[in-house]
Image (cartoon, grey):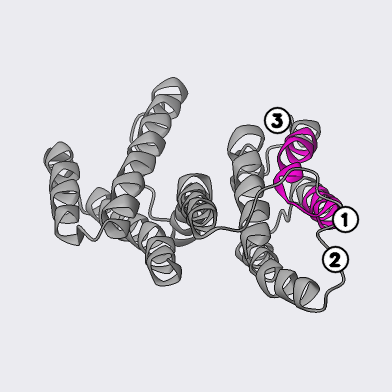
Amino acid sequence: MQQALIFVSVYFFSRIIFYDINRILYNSVSVKSGILGRIILGALFFPLIPDLRLAIIYFLLHSLLALADTFLIFKSEAKKPLSYGLHLVLLLLIFPLSGVIESAALFSRSNPVFILPESSGAVHFWLLSAGYLFTIKEGTVLIRMALNRLSTVPIKEEKDQVTDAAEYERGKWIGILERTFIFFLIVLDQVGAIALIIALKSLARFNELNKKSFAEYFLIGSLLSLLVASIPAILVRLLW
């Protein structure tokens, strides 16, 4: 399990640094893919897997998935959720695949790259890392994709691209901080404190909630953010 968790953590981490979500949300083709950086990052991290041959397989798999989600972008709005969902399903399949490989004794521990025993502490670290890294960027992708799909983003009367871009960036960081707090509060079994986070967010947007379009956008976005942070946090607690 530890090997699969390392793989998923490195994959999500590489997307945080090198992958621009505008490629998914807005079919942007002018953004650098960062594919070389993702492959190099994989080469640096996968030696943490004790078995050399298993590390090579995970590195190749990581590189293939990185190439796929960089160049296989569906321009059709209807196919985007399907393609992204398939991408997440493929990552989940890594866990049973890893178990089958190791239980079948196809790999031995005779060729270690770096000795990292599969202790409970190490498994907990990679489990927590995988869950949290998912909430950061993948959470943003899922929420933005859902909001675009539902057409809930409020339309402004005056168009200002500079202001829109700045507001979008602020909203993205607010969402990341919100999901960070929710994720760790659930992991630490402090669920009641989540109400304080939601209250603070609502207070900051209190005046704008009088507008129906913004209120719907705010409510849907907040509930999606809560859901996206809660599911991986609950899985972390169950597997802990």
Q: Which amino acid does label 2 sit on?
A: Phe
Say if residue 77 shows up in the picture: no
Q: What residue type is labelled 3?
A: Val
- Sequence-wise first label, 2 or 1: 1
Kindly identify the residue that appears in the image at 74 percent across and 29 percent down.
Answer: 32
For residue 145, side relative to residue 98 (left or right): left
- Sequence-wise first label, 2 or 3: 3
The answer to whether residue 53 is magenta is yes
> In front here: 25 or 70?
70
- Magenta segment range? 38-63
**Whole-Å distance between the Cαs marked 2 and 1?**
7 Å
Query: Main structural element of the magenta stretch: helix, strand or loop?
Result: helix
Q: Which amino acid does label 1 sit on?
A: Arg
Taking 218 as reference, is 156 above or below it? above
Residue behind mark 3: 31
Where does the image place residue 96, in percent across and percent down from the top left?
Answer: 69, 75
Kindly identify the residue that appears in the image at 81 percent across and 49 percent down.
Answer: 112
* Mark 2, secondary structure of its residue: loop
For residue 72, side relative to residue 122 (left or right): right
> In front here: 124 or 187?
124
Q: Which mark is residue 107?
A: 2
Q: Are marks 2 and 1 in contact (CB under 8 Å)?
A: yes
